[in-house]
Image (tube, rainbow, N blue to C red):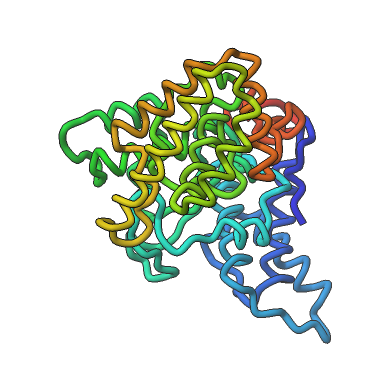
Amino acid sequence: MNPWHDHAHVDFEEAGRALGHDFHTMTQIPKQPDWPDAVCAGFDAAAHLHRSGHRRPHADRFTRKWLQLRLNAWRRQRAVAADVTPQLLRELDVVRCPVTRTVLTHGTLQDTDASVDRLNNDAAYAASNIAVMSVRANRAKGALSFAQVMARAHSAEASDGLTPAEWLRLAALMLGPCHATCPHDAPALPLCAPLPVHAVRLALQQVQRLFTEHCLRQAGKNRLLRDFSGACRSDAARLRLAALGHAVHEGLKHTEAHGQGDTRWDVWLQPAVMAALLRWREALSEADWARVAALSGRLSQARRETPERLRLWQMPTRGFVPTHTGWI
């Protein structure tokens, strides 16, 4: 039950009552003394309605995380889109933080605990704008813009709890969501972190992801080169595509031999690999690149972002809840 849909305006108090109702009907969590009045009112109403014969269920950690996310967002008057559900959080679940690469914990009150954060801070909690990361990474990110994160990635020293390499991984996660409405303004970054399964990803990132996942084995590399060769209308583009496949293949063998954990994304930090990607891109006309982008989406079974879905992000209000009485 979530009244924060894509409507132009919502009843903010009713959203709080709906949240309290869900806490009662979906979990065994007792009413908390620090809950806002609207949430308590919804909880009490549900308790009165189900006071006899109703057995409250044991909620799994994804349902608990979903309810806590909504509560924290409600307190900050942040919008939560209807496509943010316990099932979505289950699909986004990862073993390691994509920024710090530490194994995530749950409910330990340590900075390794898993948390859910918006990648574009000027937008709502929505399926294509959130990621699971550690509390440490989330805390460091705070309300920073993409440009501010990139500035820290270019620093020579650690800052705010993250190393420059970790800031660059965070920038890779933020790149798509922060350029969802202006993809042509996005810089070409190394894809040095795995992207959330539903997050906005740009065409170049989609290509990088496919090469990372398929080029370690010779057979996978050859299939991918055959797929993309049809979009290359010149001999120069086909030669540079082959050079890219070779560079990624050799680079992945190097990272697999020397890395610990899933370090394959570091292949794009190798200057020769990123240079090969950009050389191939330069050999393609805009029409050819559009074909590459469309093909990469089909091969990845990616969902194309649309203006209708981006409405869920509430960007006109920078992700705050628009109410029936005006803008918060």
Q: How many marks?
A: 0
Q: Is residue 216 above or below residue 144?
A: below
Residue 231's x, y, as percent? 64, 25
Q: Nearer the viewer, residue 275 or 104?
A: 275
Q: Which residue is found at the position 32% from the left and 39% from the top?
A: 167
> Would residue 262 appear left or right of 204 to someone viewing this image?
left
The outermost residue toward the front is 235
Q: Residue furthest left?
A: 157
Q: Is residue 235 left or right of residue 244?
A: right
Q: Nearer the viewer, residue 309 or 46?
A: 309
Residue 316 x/y as whole percent: 64, 23
Quarter placement of the N terminus: bottom right
321 relative to 29, above or below = above
The answer to whether 115 is drawn above or below residue 56 in the figure is: above
Q: Residue at x 40, y 56 (%)?
A: 97
Residue in front for this viewpoint, 259 or 220: 220
Which x, y percent locates residue 292?
A: 62, 28
Residue 135 figure quarter: bottom left
Is residue 168 in view from this perspective? yes
Q: Quick one: quadrant of the C terminus?
A: top right
On screen, 139 above or below 262? above
The location of residue 182, given as percent across then percent down, is: 57, 19
